[in-house]
Amino acid sequence: MLRITTYRQLPRITCSIRLVEAVRFTSTTHVPPIREVSTKQKDERGHANLGLPKDQQNSQKPGFKIGNMSFLDIGTRVYNNQGIAEQDDNKFTTKPAYVHADFTETGLQNVDLAHHVPKTLGDKVSLNLTLFCRHCFDLVTGYKWPKTNDPNEFKGTRWEMTESKWLTRVIFLESVAGVPGATASFLRHLYSLRMLKRDRAWCETLIDEAYNERVHLLTFLKIGKPSWFTRSIIYIGQGIFTNVFFFMYLLKPTYCHRFVGYLEEEAVKTYTHLLHDMDQPGNLPLFQNMKVPQIAVDYWPNLTQESSFRDLILQIRADESKHREVNHTFANLDQHKDRNPFALHLPDENKPQPNSGLDVVKPAGWERKDLTL
Ligand SMILES: [Fe+2]
Ligand SMILES: [Fe+2]
């Protein structure tokens, strides 16, 4: 039989001799031992060195904090700080094609959950499709949104989130999140070419969004190594999702932007949950003293080599909140007549208008009547 256990990471596959039994998901509370991290032991970038004696701090070999997992383990392996440093390969590094906006500290802290109340049939279809996808993904990967403030609510159950499970989740989600912006901007680009018309700056923001999501993914790939199983699901999932989104965008672009807006609502929820989990004492120790990969330092203006993993997640959550605002706004606009108010600013505009920062925002999207178009 093929038996899948969640193992407090993602499911891992183990074999058994019994022949006829279905694939099933079970959980165990066993986890590989993790060395305690002393906050006093820091390396030259201010990060802890996994509790190694000082004379050994610089000799720790690149590798994983958890593992050695076998081929049959399908959780994501988490790199140690030396492993992350080794991943900081600048061979193919270029300057970011789309410079990231400079988010203020207040703006970062003020990011919160928000919901666009569905009004049209398209809104309702988009919302229910998003929730359906999310519930299926949560069920399969062993994730639950906490219902109480008890940090031990899911302790020892298959819903408990470990560093490995978090990384699997965000790597999968970011691999999907980069598709809509790229597909939508590609289609709008073609429309502009064949109709001999200006695009009114929509392409810019959409391709910027796709680039931003890919940097999220590349950053997480410096921190964790997904298994063959995760890679396979991503490979197949992209083939299906990209084609469906492509044809849906040709037919109903407003539905698609609303769908992405709702997906981004869920992304903000997920990262808010991760931040909350990290703030619990003793929780997710592998993330507590982790180095921020160089690719992230080079991309986000507010990150430095001294930034923490938490700082990184705050930036990524803010990006998701911006995607949420942009896509809900786009869904409210005339797709071919209205300008993109996030990129195309009008001179001498007195009333507040959207921009790429975090200080003037409408998290559930700007209504068309409030915009000068
Ligand atoms: Fe993202
Ligand atoms: Fe996003």
Image: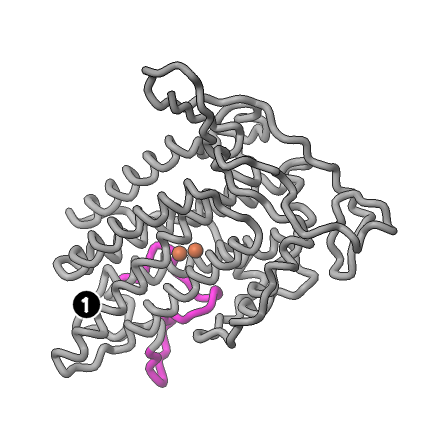
Nearer to me, 4 or 135: 4
Decide if residue 148 is in sight here.
no
On whether residue 5 falls in the magenta region, the answer is no
Residue at 30% across, 47% down: 236
Q: Residue furthest bottom?
A: 347
Classify residue 40 as left or right of residue 260.
right
Residue at 54% across, 40% down: 164
Nearer to me, 165 or 339: 165
Nearer to me, 242 or 189: 242
Whole-percent x and y of residue 357? 46, 68
User: Quadrant where the C terminus lies?
Assistant: bottom left
Whole-percent x and y of residue 368? 24, 65
On whether residue 352 falls in the magenta region, the answer is yes
Residue at 47% across, 43% down: 227
For label 1, the residue is 335
Classify residue 260 as left or right of residue 191.
right
Nearer to me, 132 or 56: 56
Which quadrant of the frame does ligand 2 lie within?
A: bottom left
Q: Which secondary structure dominates the residues rendered in magenta? A: loop
Which residues fall within the magenta stretch? 344-367
Classify residue 250 as left or right of residue 136.
left
Whole-percent x and y of residue 245? 22, 55
User: Quadrant where the N terminus lies?
Assistant: top left
